[in-house]
Image: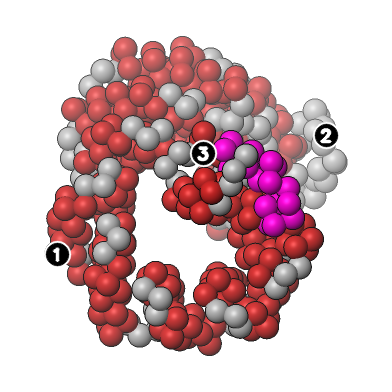
């Protein structure tokens, strides 16, 4: 039953204690407890344990002894029935508490409510009783009762109030639960406007409802009330990170930067800095990106290799290939077998026509992991494009295909190899397959157009290139094909 799990572990410990404590061992009476039934006939018994000096009827004594025996035998339903009858006849807090906890353990909502109502009449400030009553109210979706019990808990124990309110958000699952939680939190916000945990809970709920602007507003309110609350600070930082990534995906770079720069939480500060650098890359603000990289290295010296990789990317983006190569060479001096550095330098080496370094770096990766498909594909494609070592290229690319037969870039590489080998039909088959799997990748489009052109399907090749140029008119692969082939063709 919903929400019982928040308190039922406590009741289980209590039930176990009920029949194992040395002070409360069941009395051997010779009476048998039948399955699920109680004999209404009072039992005449001479108790072995000492009883309170107050008068107690034989019927109540019988019910208590029956309940204790049932607990010993783990017949909890029988024990609950007996204790509930006792609870309605005696004014004893221990009996009331035990009855409520057994009912809670059995997840019997009706009997839990009966028992805890009697308990609260006797001891209205008892925190455990209030927690159990809150459980009942939440299961019944009784907003007024839930607010009442939470208010009593807040007055007695503010820390317990905060813990419960946050746990409630984790426990609610269904749409109906969420709506009830929203109404409950709204009521609490009106009655307890100085309780930051109420607003943090509203923020958590708003995130669940995908209302991120409201989530930011509510967590900001929580931080006004409690500026140094770590949990709220971290949640706000995560919300800024989410907003920044969303803006970045939408190519709203100014908004993305604004969000990322607001993140000050220590756990997310490094990620925020990297995100800022990424945005600056997109904006081609390379000097600013380098400034952030210097700052990142100063604040996080353990990230030195990562910083060098990003500095190399800044140079690569500006087509300063030798500078990028030198930075990566420096990184390899510090970390000779770092896979990311080796792979990045191999890509730069290809642009510098340094095939010796390229092959050496990729082979070092393959020495560590012979099944590294990215290295296999890069090596196979480069040998296809830059050399006539087609047998070596085919060996690498076949291995990569066997490992990842659905990967479009590997299929493209193998199709391009078939073209270089003069097998145009096989090339067409693989390149069409690659383009179907990865639309919008212009290098694949150009490879396919090249094969179509050589198969004398020139109109089809021209149409393919022109359609893609409408989408990305500045793409270097498309412009190169157009200048090399289409512009020279007389229609």
Residue situated in front as seen by the camera: 275 or 144: 275
Residue 454 painted magenta:
yes
Magenta segment boundaries in residue numbering = 451-467
> What residue is rendered at 33% in x and 32% in y?
252
Residue situated in front as seen by the camera: 23 or 390: 390
List x then y, in percent, for residue 217.
29, 23
Neighbour tally class for label 1: few under 14, some 14-19, many 20 plus, Cα within 10 Å: few
Please tell me which of labels 3 and 2 falls first in the chain: 2
Q: Which residue lies under the disc numbered 2?
A: 37
* Rendered-image quadrant of the N terminus: top right
Q: Which residue lies under the disc numbered 1?
A: 298
Image position of 229 (left or right of 216)? left
Q: Label for residue 469?
A: 3
Please tell me which of labels 2 and 1 falls first in the chain: 2
Please tell me which of labels 3 and 1 falls first in the chain: 1
Proximity of marks 3 and 2: CB atoms separated by less than 8 Å:
no
């Amino acid at each position: 039953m919903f929400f019982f799990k928040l308190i039922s572990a406590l009741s289980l410990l209590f039930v176990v204690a009920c029949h194992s404590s040395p002070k409360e061992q069941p009395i051997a009476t010779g009476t048998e407890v039948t399955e699920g039934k109680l004999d209404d006939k009072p039992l005449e018994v001479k108790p072995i344990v000492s009883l309170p000096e107050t008068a107690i009827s034989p019927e109540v004594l019988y019910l208590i002894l029956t309940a204790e025996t049932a607990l010993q035998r783990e017949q909890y339903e029988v024990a609950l029935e007996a204790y509930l009858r006792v609870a309605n006849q005696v004014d004893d807090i221990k009996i009331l508490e035990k009855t409520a906890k057994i009912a809670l353990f059995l997840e019997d909502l009706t009997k839990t409510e009966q028992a805890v109502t009697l308990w609260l009449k006797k001891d209205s400030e008892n925190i455990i009783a209030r927690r159990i009553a809150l459980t009942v109210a939440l299961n019944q979706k009784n907003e007024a009762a839930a607010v009442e019990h939470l208010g009593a808990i807040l007055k007695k124990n503010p820390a317990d109030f905060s813990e419960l309110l946050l746990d409630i958000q984790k426990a609610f699952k269904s749409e109906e639960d969420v709506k009830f939680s929203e109404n409950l939190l709204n009521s609490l916000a009106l009655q307890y406007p100085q309780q930051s945990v109420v607003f943090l809970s509203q923020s958590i709920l708003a995130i669940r409802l995908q209302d991120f602007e409201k989530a930011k507003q509510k967590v900001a309110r929580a931080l006004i009330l409690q500026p140094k609350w770590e949990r709220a600070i971290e949640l706000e930082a995560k919300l800024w990170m989410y907003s920044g990534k969303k803006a970045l995906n939408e190519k709203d770079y100014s908004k993305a930067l604004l969000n990322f720069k607001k993140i000050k939480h220590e756990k997310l500060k490094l990620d925020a800095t990297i995100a800022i650098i990424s945005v600056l890359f997109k904006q081609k603000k390379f000097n600013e990106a380098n400034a952030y990289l210097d700052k990142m290295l100063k604040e996080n010296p353990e990230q030195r290799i990562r910083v060098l990789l990003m500095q190399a990317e800044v140079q690569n983006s500006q087509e300063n290939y030798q500078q990028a190569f030198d930075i990566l060479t420096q990184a390899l001096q510090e970390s000779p077998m770092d896979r990311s550095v080796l792979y990045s330098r191999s890509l730069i080496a290809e642009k510098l026509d340094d095939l010796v370094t390229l092959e050496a770096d990729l082979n070092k990766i393959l020495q560590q992991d012979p099944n590294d498909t990215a290295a296999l594909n890069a090596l196979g494609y480069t040998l296809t494009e830059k050399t006539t070592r087609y047998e070596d290229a085919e060996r690498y690319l076949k291995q990569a295909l066997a490992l990842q037969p659905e990967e479009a870039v590997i299929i493209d590489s193998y199709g391009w190899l078939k073209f270089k080998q003069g097998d145009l039909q096989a090339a067409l088959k693989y390149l069409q397959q690659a383009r179907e799997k990865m639309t919008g990748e212009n290098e694949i489009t150009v490879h396919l157009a090249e094969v179509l052109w050589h198969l004398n399907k020139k109109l089809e090749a021209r149409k393919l290139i022109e359609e893609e140029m409408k989408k990305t008119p500045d793409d270097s692969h498309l412009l190169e094909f157009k200048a090399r082939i289409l512009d020279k063709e007389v229609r």
